Amino acid sequence: MSILDKHSAYRHAYDTLLQHGVDPLNVRFDSVLSPTEGMLNGRRTILLGTNNYLGLTFDPDCIEKSVEATRSQGTGTTGSRVANGTYDSHTRLEHELADFYGRKHAMVFSTGYQANLGVLSALVGRGDHLMLDADSHASIYDGSRLGMAEVIRFRHNNPDDLHKRLRRLEGMPGHRLIVVEGIYSMLGDTAPLKEIAAVKRETGAYLLVDEAHSLGVLGETGRGLAEKAGVEADVDFIVGTFSKSLGSVGGFCVSDSPDFDIMRIVSRPYMFTASLPPGVMASTLEALHKLRTEPKLRSDLMRNAHRLYDGLAAMGFETGPEANPIVAVAMPDQDLAVVFWKMLLESGLYLNLALPPATPTNVRLLRTSVSAAHTIEQIDTALAIFEDVGRRLGFLTDERRRAAGAL
Amino acid sequence: MGPLRSDIADIFEQVLGHPVQIADNTNIVEDLGMDSLGVMNFVMAIEDFYDISIPLDRIAQIITVGDLIHAVEDLRSGTPS
Ligand SMILES: Cc1ncc(COP(=O)(O)O)c(C=O)c1O
């Protein structure tokens, strides 16, 4: 009897995976060579599952700024801002984020996960109502448990269901906060934000959008889905992360909400953890500058996303509903998903194997994420590997290809 | 079986695709073999049927059919949890 026996169902599911001779939850790179290539089991491998949307992890300017800041400011802050003080780069980063979004306030957290925990727990409390999309990221669910608000799930991307649930709360005291994501991390689908904003206006709720996967990806200037959908004025709070398009680590929230700064002394995930180190903030600032001044990054990214999405769909693979930098391919069962993933890896293509309970509606996914740094040749190589494995496994049949219009 | 029980049995049947025998002490996950997605679909069907929303912390407390009936009755009468 071990104290961890309560997790035996997970142990069992994990063991079943391992029987395929792979450990998808523990891929060990020998080394990472660039935003798009790594060495895996001695083999040069295309990285197609890293959320490195703008490909800035090896950007020479970002690296230079990070090195410079580390030399002059040290490797870490060794504490939280409330106890151990704020560095100039914290203030500058917050100022730049507020400026980028055209908002009055910005607050930086040590990860995006903590940003959701810190913001959600501070915004809603006992007597308030938190309305979550059922497919929300784990950090949103976990954040919802940190406060005392009543948490209600609505059907994924379903503004009518949201509306119905807000209507049921009519006459009850307390604030309502709706939480949705810009791009959902598993299927790459976007929230119907115009419609959700309309529900928000009609019901007097607040709206928070987690733009983790859409910052630098969507919108005329890269501000995300709210910008693309033209509803920024309706979005009261935007949360995001530095760990994807900005190639570092950290999270943030921006808003025009009066009294925003009170969160700095009530938000426990902000107060009781060490703040970001100077080297991380320096590369993030430089990456944000590139995001703002190099729109070509975004157009290259979208070119690659469309090429991969269209290519896979044409072969007869079942992809997500929209061509975005997250392209997910649905697999009919877990065994095939695992074997497919393993063969892709052995052919030099790394991507994510996403299985329930991490996926919505129990789907099994080969989840890819495209980068602006991928060359067209790399995308085409990835497509060729997909096609080869699909044929060898007897998955890409003529029938499937015909149905996709490929024959 | 009261009207609530028979409605709930109908909803179980719709979600699971086969008829079920339920009693107050029926364990929803263990006895009816529902996975987490099944439970979520079932909860949403119940919510639609009774025009209520069951908050997440309430859902976490629902283990048996009896717990579920109790929660539905509470929420329909507007009694706070
Ligand atoms: C929607 C969403 N929110 C938040 C996060 C957390 O971000 P971070 O990696 O910075 O903790 C992620 C990704 O991990 C995410 O997909």
Image (cartoon, rainbow, N blue to C red):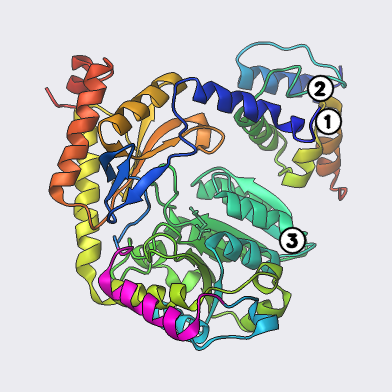
Chain containing the residue with disc 1: B
Residue A74: say if magenta.
yes
Q: Which residue is mark 2?
A: B5
Proximity of marks 1 and 2: CB atoms separated by less than 8 Å? yes
Residue A362: say if magenta.
no
Q: Is residue A135 above or below residue A212?
A: above
Instruction: Name the residue rendered at 53%, 62% in the picture.
Output: A112
- Residue A284: x and y, percent? 40, 73
- Residue A103: x and y, percent? 47, 81
Dot 1 lies on which element?
helix
User: Earlier along the polypeptide chain: callout 1 or callout 2?
Assistant: 2
Q: Quadrant of the C terminus of chain A?
A: top left
Residue A62 visible within the image: yes
- Mark nearest the camera among 3 and 2 is 3
Disc number placed over residue A147 in the picture, else none: 3
Which region shows up in magenta? A56-76
Q: Residues within 10 Å of mark 3 (few under 14, many from 20)?
A: many
Q: Which residue is mark 1?
A: B69
